[in-house]
Image (cartoon, rainbow, N blue to C red):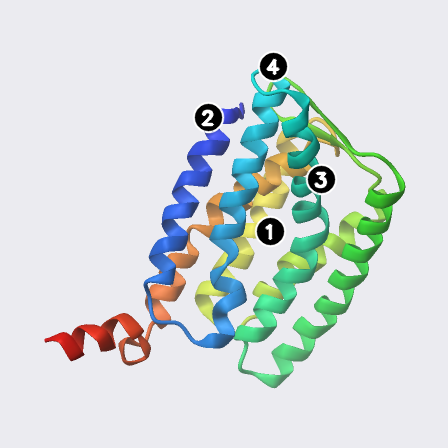
Amino acid sequence: MCFSPEASFAASGILAGTSIAIMRLPRDGRSLPLSLFPAIFAAHQFIEGVLWLNQDGVLPDPYKAVALPAYVLIAYVLWPILVPFAAYMTEPERGRRLVILACQVVGVGVGLSLLVGLLQDPVDVSATCCSLVYHVNAPDLLLAPYLIAVSIPFLASSQRSLVLFGVGITVSCAVAAVATASAATFPSVWCFFAALLSAGLYLHFRTVARPSDSVLTSLRAMLS
């Protein structure tokens, strides 16, 4: 398995296109956090592409000084907080919302704990033959709560397409764990897989789209 700046930038471009396609679909206002996933992953992969170019000596260290904190904040702090929130906002059933809310509490705890660690110790990145290694203050005991926060919320969803997304996230986690040589390379590999999976959210929004809610459809009707 080999990752590269080309792979990161290609993934970023695909996800940027997916994000634009989702934004053109009619969506309920409560689904806005979920609809932002491909756009955030697009930015995340673009940032990692910049870090790859820095490691390859193409870009100087000032680029790394901006890109590295941005990458680790998204990977370690944003996702465990945003994923449960997005799932909670799209879930109509009260019982399932309570399960997701419990995951939200876990996610906030994990995100804030990792944020403290990132602020206390300097972060760095290096390259192996096939992935980037992020040197961060992330205790191993936070791994399980992190995985709970980013996988269980979608597995608990009443919407089949989001359950499948949750299954994909969980499976990609297992594949990344097997494919990586160390815990330090795990975030880069797993985020790449999760980013690609987020492109599938277009099918979810395409399925649940209600044409009557579409501003674009309304404008077309007025002009016809």
Q: Please, is residue 4 above or below residue 10 in the view?
A: above
Res 57 label: 4
Q: CA distance from mark 2 to mark 4?
A: 15 Å
Residue farthest along the right direction in this orientation: 120
Q: CA distance from mark 1 to mark 2?
A: 26 Å
Residue 62 % position (x, y) = 67, 27
Mark nearer the viewer, 3 or 2: 3
**Contact (Cβ within 8 Å) of mark 1 with mark 3:** no
Q: Which residue is mark 3?
A: 69
Q: Secondary structure at mark 2?
A: helix
Q: Report the residue at 62% width, 65% height from top.
A: 153
Res 170 label: 1
Residue 111 % position (x, y) = 76, 55
Q: Which residue is mark 2?
A: 6
Q: CA distance from mark 4 to mark 3?
A: 19 Å
Residue 207 % position (x, y) = 34, 68
Is tag 4's residue or tag 1's residue first in the polypeptide sequence? 4
Is tag 1's residue or tag 2's residue first in the polypeptide sequence? 2
Q: Does residue 171 show up?
A: yes
Q: Secondary structure at mark 1?
A: helix
Q: Amino acid at mark 4?
A: Gly
Is tag 1's residue or tag 3's residue first in the polypeptide sequence? 3
Q: Where is the C terminus found, in terms of image quarters?
A: bottom left
Mark nearer the viewer, 4 or 1: 4
**Contact (Cβ within 8 Å) of mark 2 with mark 4:** no
Question: Between 166 and 47, which is closer to the camera in this rendering?
Answer: 47
Residue 222 % position (x, y) = 17, 79
Q: Amino acid at mark 3?
A: Pro
Q: Secondary structure at mark 4?
A: loop
